[in-house]
Image: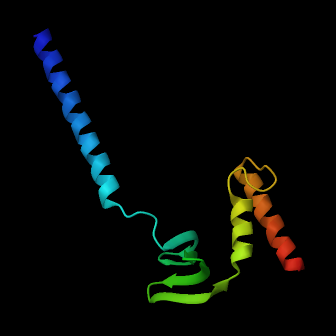
Amino acid sequence: MGLELVKVFAALLVTLAAVYLMLRFFKQKMLPKKGMIEMLHYQSFGPKRGIAVIKILNNYMAVGIADEGISLLGKLNPAEIEEWRKASAPGGGEGSKTEDDNQKMKLKWLRTKREK
């Protein structure tokens, strides 16, 4: 009885390993690589409503998203977006480590932009 249980357990492990490897292989083949369009940030304002900052090639845009469709709100300055991304990245800016520090960096960045 003990030997049969070991055989069943070994067969189960081999089957699970094969399924894992197959899923990993197909995931790499089926999922698209990083394309031309990248969503950098999305802020929800309710169910199926929000604003997104997207990057298409080297152009940054703010778009409004709602049930009715997607609307271009405006084009954004690439230099300011890259500066914001650096400030909001984990460990970016002035060496911030926590989420609270990241929020403080974002607020500081926004204040400096408003003063200009």
Q: Identify whether 10 is placed above or below 2.
A: below
Residue 113 % position (x, y): 83, 76
Query: Residue at left 56%, top 89%?
Result: 72
Q: 102 or 37: which is nearer to us?
A: 37
Q: 26 or 53: which is nearer to us?
A: 26
Residue 87 % position (x, y): 74, 61
Q: 29 or 46: which is nearer to us?
A: 29
Q: Quadrant of the C terminus?
A: bottom right
State left or right for residue 4 relative to residue 84: left
Which residue is at the far top? 2
Q: 93 or 25: which is nearer to us?
A: 25
Which residue is at the far right? 115
State left or right for residue 53 relative to residue 90: left
State left or right for residue 53 relative to residue 83: left
Residue 109 occupies quadrant: bottom right
Query: Residue at left 17%, top 16%?
Result: 6
Q: Identify whether 32 is placed above or below 114.
A: above
Residue 114 % position (x, y): 85, 78
Query: Residue at left 47%, top 77%?
Result: 48
